[in-house]
Every structure is written in C-alpha cells, then in structure tokens.
Image: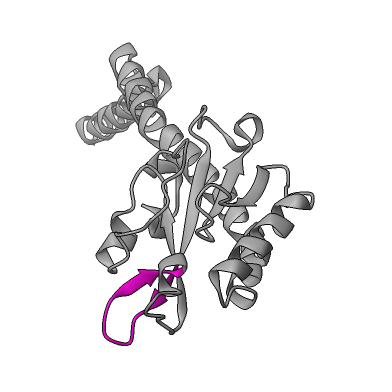
Amino acid sequence: MRCLNEGRRDDRGYENRSKGDQMKALQKGFTLIELMIVVAIIGILAAVALPAYQDYMVRARVTEGLSLASDAKSVVGTGSSTLGELTAVTDAFNAAPPPSSKYVTSVRLDHAGYTGAIIISFNAGNIGPIGADNQLTLTPFIRNPAGGFVQLAASFGPPAITGSLDWACASASNETAAGRGMAAGIVPPANPMAIRFVPSECR
C-alpha cells in the first residue's frame, strides 16, 4: 500500500510539474525572430495595400468630374444640329463660370477645334497624387447607321450622318473607346491623367 501511495504521489507530482512547464512556456511569449517575421509581413501588406488604396480614392474622386460633365453633355447633345450651332453652344458654355468642385477645377468645351469635346481638369492639390497630368476628355461621336462611329463635328457632312450620340473618354490611353470603334477623332487631353487613376471607361 505504501508503494502504491508513493506511486500516486509521484504521478501527481509529475502532472503538477508538467502543468508548470506548460505555463512557463506560455509565459515566454513570442521569440524575437517570430516578432520580426510578423513585422515583416505587416510591412509587406502595407507596401502593397496603401498605394492600391490611394489609387482607389483618386478614382472615386475622378468619377465626380465625369458627373459634373453631364450639363456639358446635354448642351452638346441638344443644341448642336449643325457645325454653326456647335460653335455657338461651345462659346456660350465657355463664357459662363465653369462647373467646379473640391476635386474639379473646371469643365470646358473644346474651343480650339470646336469638336464638342469636353475637357475636365482636376484639382491636383485635393484629388491626390496626380501631379500636373490632371485632365480627361470626353469626345462626342455619332453612331453611323452604316456601321461604326463618326466624330460629331464630322457628322455634319457633307454628307450628313444622323444617329445616336455616344462619348469616348480619354486619359493617357483611349484603348477602351478605340475598342468600341471610336479611335479616329478622339480629342486627347493636353495633360492626360495616368490610367491607374481613371475609371475603366477612360483607359
């Protein structure tokens, strides 16, 4: 009996020591190498995620400029049945105070070629890290019933072409519009915004 009792005490002592060892192991926490690995992973995630988030925020603000261009679209779409009318509405629109906001410096119509193109200039100080390349353009096209698109100014003819109005957006690229058949006649921005900052329709 004595031996049995002593064996049981030894077992309990072993269990207590084993639990104590486990508690000590837990109390040790992370090693220096483990902490360095965690810090490195956080650094990598931050280096990848932060620029992507900044680009996303700029794109969201650029969308506001496209919304501000809606009045200019209406003016061109409803008041330009002839080249003379397009010239007149361009001059009248540009004579008024330009639409603007915190992120948009101005919305103007192309007065160099009187194409009906809308030039949107963004406020680089508020919108994000776009630098001096702060413009997008929206060029109006007429869908040709015979196929393809014709720039609005060229559609007056002769021969005149009538059809539905569509818009081609351009930044540092116009591949999306070109892929839709509106490559010829797009008015490029003087200071084209980098494609990573613009919506897909303007790339």
Q: Position of residue 137 (x, y in %)?
A: 49, 51
Of residues 120 and 144, the one drawn nearer to the viewer in this rendering = 144
Q: Position of residue 52 (x, y in %)?
A: 41, 39
Relative placement, left or right, of 83 versus 158 is right
Residue farthest to the bottom? 145
Magenta highlight range? 141-152
| Residue pictured at 45% horizontal, 39% vertical | 193
Count of numbered badges drawn on the protein: 0
Q: Is residue 150 magenta?
A: yes
Residue nearest the viewer, comparing 33 with 154: 154
Residue 50: where, in percent of width, then height? 45, 33
Residue 195 found in image quarter: top left
Q: Is residue 58 magenta?
A: no
- What percent of the width, then of the height, locates residue 59? 50, 48
Q: Residue furthest right?
A: 97
78 vs 180, left or right, is right
Q: Name above or below for residue 165 compared with residue 68.
A: below
Q: Where is residue 116, by image quadrant?
A: bottom right
